[in-house]
């Protein structure tokens, strides 16, 4: 009897996992970036063009001399292409930075003079994820693979 119950339990868990994996919209609440989702990337490209390109460049090239503070002490916008450091951060960090600003990551005692706006009242989390998915979709395969490994480490996998 115990064996039947155990087999039923294992089978039920397997079926539930399969349903979650294939159910339409099951991934909708997933916070991870989706650089292979054509619709997500297309939406993200439009959001990037409207909200990000004026500072980070239409080609994701960033502002000149982005590692050095300008005369006002503010750091210029970094590139989001493979030459920048965006891909060095896991998805959750990128989403938090975009939604809540640099201060949300560094804490209230750390002041960084950045022109990066806070987007929580401008874009939804899904729109932020789409813009970041677009950015990731432009990276070469080896950079994307490295970023995937960074995410796996951050998630404890």
Image (cartoon, helix red, strand yellow):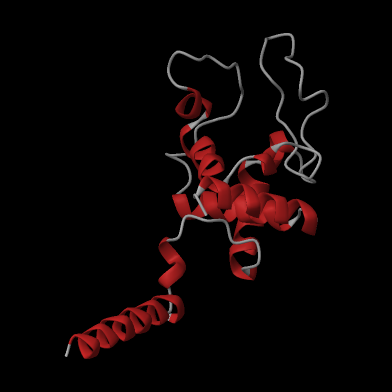
Q: Position of residue 157 (x, y in %)?
A: 52, 54
In the foreground, 67 or 22: 22
Image quadrant holding the N terminus, namely: bottom left
In the foreground, 114 or 105: 105
Q: Residue at x 42, y 17 (%)?
A: 108
Q: Residue at x 45, y 21 (%)?
A: 107
In the foreground, 155 or 4: 4
Q: Residue at x 43, y 73 (%)?
A: 25
Q: Where is residue 144 in the image (x, y as percent from the top left)?
A: 72, 55
Picture quadrant of residue 34: bottom right
In the foreground, 28 or 92: 92
Q: Where is residue 14 in the image (x, y as percent from the top left)?
A: 37, 81
45 to the left or right of 84: left
Q: In this view, does 65 lie above or below 3?
A: above
Q: Is residue 137 above or below residue 48?
A: below
Question: In the image as oriented, which residue stretches furthest toward the left?
Answer: 1
């Amino acid at each position: 009897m115990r064996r039947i119950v155990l087999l039923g339990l294992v089978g039920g868990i397997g079926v539930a996992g399969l349903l979650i994996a294939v159910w339409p919209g099951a991934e909708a609440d997933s916070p991870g970036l989706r650089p292979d989702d054509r619709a997500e990337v297309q939406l993200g490209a439009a959001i990037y063009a409207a909200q990000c390109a004026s500072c980070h460049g239409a080609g994701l090239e960033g502002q000149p001399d982005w590692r050095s503070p300008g005369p006002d002490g503010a750091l210029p916008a970094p590139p989001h292409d493979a030459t920048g450091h965006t891909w060095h951060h896991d998805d959750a960090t990128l989403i938090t930075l975009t939604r809540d600003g640099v201060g949300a990551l560094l804490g209230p005692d750390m002041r960084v003079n950045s022109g990066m706006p806070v987007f929580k009242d401008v874009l939804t989390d899904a729109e932020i994820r789409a813009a970041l998915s677009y950015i990731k979709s432009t990276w070469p395969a080896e950079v994307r693979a490295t970023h995937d490994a960074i995410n796996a480490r951050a998630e404890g996998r």
